[in-house]
């Protein structure tokens, strides 16, 4: 997988590589401490793939909870980007003057409803058609969301902000396959009393991050629907729940209604990867200089090529963690004269060449062969590092 890191670049810069027909996108991703890093990624990269790249780059433990978030700073709204969504499509909906951000953080509740559905769908907010058995389990409810044409109905009171006004009105809402409706007459569900509120195929759902501050909502449990390619805040469909449990139920049901089986596939993908599938679902793209490189294992008496991508990924993560541990040991031992002499002991060995070019190293290898082992030389680009042909290791 080709990935480059750039500095001081615009968040939406798109560039064409001279030696590649692929379109590349430069995105800026923030951490929770508001530090950011720019990533150059292919235009068809998904949110999950961006998370995987950041996990590997930062040597984080992948517990399947890392998530890419979209935050609309001027409106105080945010949402967890679904794993299958294309990052370029998300950013294409941003206005040119909007200072929106992508955040990389953990979100443990992303797929929790698959593990514990009873906490997300309270009985008093759900009803079923007369054809459905009333005694249905919570796992059966999920099956209905994902597979069945008989969709469970979510209902309850929500505060809705009136279009073009600052006032909010409490209405009785119903969520059905065709969209979200509210009743014009109390809690009546008769078709003549139901008025269409919004649908979800061409809009995204956001949670209010500022509570009552910006929108003046009656409670702190706001959420809204923002049409794609919309003109601004005037097109927002803003709602407010009475408590956190009801907001979670509404938002989870909308996600299941909009994405269906795709959500379950996103949830199961990391577990499928354990059986030999690569966790990255995009086509590997390598620069010309990387085309001749392969993953190698030198732990045994004979070296071998690692052909399984999952094994290669695990080895890379282990090597990264081992490198960090060795780095900590070097920092802790700097005050010891013995340790300092051990660090530089390689300089007195016949196999060490201080600063020579790659061509010169290749010539020495071809001249002497591999009988006496590998030739080692210092790295021009990274201090206190050494190079063994194409492999980079620490100087300890």
Image (tube, rainbow, N blue to C red):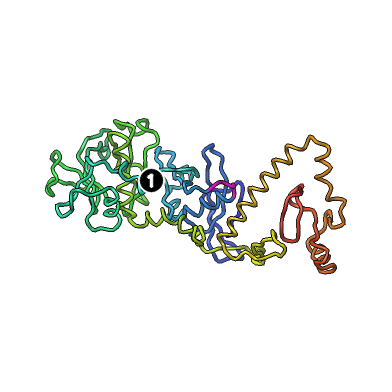
Examine the rendered structure and indicate whether residue 230 appears above or below residue 161.
below
Residue 253 x, y percent position in the rendering: 30, 47
Residue 168 location, quadrant: top left
- Which of the pair 98/327 is nearer the observer? 327
Q: Quadrant of the N terminus?
A: bottom right
- Tell me: 57 left or right of 257: right
Based on the picture, tell me whether residue 60 belongs to the magenta stretch.
Answer: yes
Left or right, 100 with respect to 203, comes to right
In x, y percent, where is residue 264? 37, 55
Q: Quadrant of residue 356?
A: bottom right
Q: Residues within 10 Å of mark 1 (few under 14, many from 20)?
A: few
* Looking at the image, residue 305 lies above or below residue 212: below
Q: Nearer the viewer, residue 213 or 394?
A: 394
**Secondary structure of the residue carrying numbered label 1:** helix
The residue shown at (70%, 45%) is 326
Where is residue 310 shown, x and y percent of the image?
Answer: 55, 59
Examine the residues drawn in magenta and state their main secondary structure.
Answer: loop
Residue 234 in sight here: no
In the rendered image, residue 277, in percent from the top left (x then y), is placed at 50, 62
Q: Nearer the viewer, residue 389 or 115?
A: 115
Please give the range of residues in magenta.
Answer: 57-61
Magenta region includes residue 126 = no
For disc 1, the marked residue is 112
| Observer-nearest of 313 and 242 | 313
**Quadrant of the rendered image containing residue 240:** top left
| In the image: residue 396, left or right of residue 144 | right
Tell me if residue 360 comes above or below residue 166 in the rendering: below
């Amino acid at each position: 997988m080709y990935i480059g890191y750039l500095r001081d670049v615009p968040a939406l810069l798109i560039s064409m590589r001279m030696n590649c027909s692929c379109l590349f996108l430069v995105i800026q991703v923030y951490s929770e401490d508001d530090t950011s890093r720019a990533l150059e990624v292919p235009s068809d990269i998904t949110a999950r793939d961006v998370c995987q790249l950041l996990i590997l780059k930062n040597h984080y433990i992948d517990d399947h909870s890392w998530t890419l978030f979209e935050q609309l700073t001027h409106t105080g709204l945010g949402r967890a980007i679904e794993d299958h969504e294309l990052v370029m499509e998300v950013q294409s909906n941003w206005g040119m003057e909007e200072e929106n951000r992508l955040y990389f953080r953990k979100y443990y509740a992303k797929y929790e409803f698959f593990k514990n559905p009873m906490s997300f769908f309270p009985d008093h907010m759900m009803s079923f058609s007369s054809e459905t058995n009333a005694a249905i389990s919570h796992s059966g409810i999920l099956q209905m969301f994902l597979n069945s044409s008989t969709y469970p109905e979510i209902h309850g009171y929500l505060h809705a902000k009136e279009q073009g006004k600052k006032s909010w009105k409490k209405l009785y809402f119903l969520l059905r396959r065709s969209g979200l409706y509210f009743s014009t007459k109390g809690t009546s569900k008769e078709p003549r009393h139901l008025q269409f509120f919004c649908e979800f195929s061409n809009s995204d759902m956001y949670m209010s991050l500022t509570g009552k501050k910006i929108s003046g909502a009656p409670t702190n449990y706001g959420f809204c629907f923002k049409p794609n390619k919309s003109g601004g805040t005037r097109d927002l469909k803003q709602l407010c729940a009475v408590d956190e449990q009801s907001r979670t139920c509404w938002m989870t049901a909308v996600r299941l209604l909009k994405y269906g089986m795709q959500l379950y596939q996103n949830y199961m993908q990391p577990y499928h990867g354990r059986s030999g599938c690569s966790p990255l679902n995009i086509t590997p793209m390598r620069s010309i200089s990387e085309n001749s490189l392969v993953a190698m294992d030198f732990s045994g008496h004979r070296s071998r090529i690692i052909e399984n991508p999952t094994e290669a990924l695990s080895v890379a993560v282990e090597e990264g963690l081992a490198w960090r541990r060795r780095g900590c040991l070097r920092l802790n031992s700097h005050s010891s004269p013995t340790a300092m002499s051990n660090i530089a002991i390689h300089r007195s060995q016949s196999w060490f060449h201080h600063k020579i070019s790659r061509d010169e190293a290749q010539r020495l290898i071809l001249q002497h062969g591999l009988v006496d082992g590998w030739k080692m030389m210092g790295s021009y680009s990274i201090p206190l590092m050494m190079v063994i042909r194409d492999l980079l290791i620490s100087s300890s």
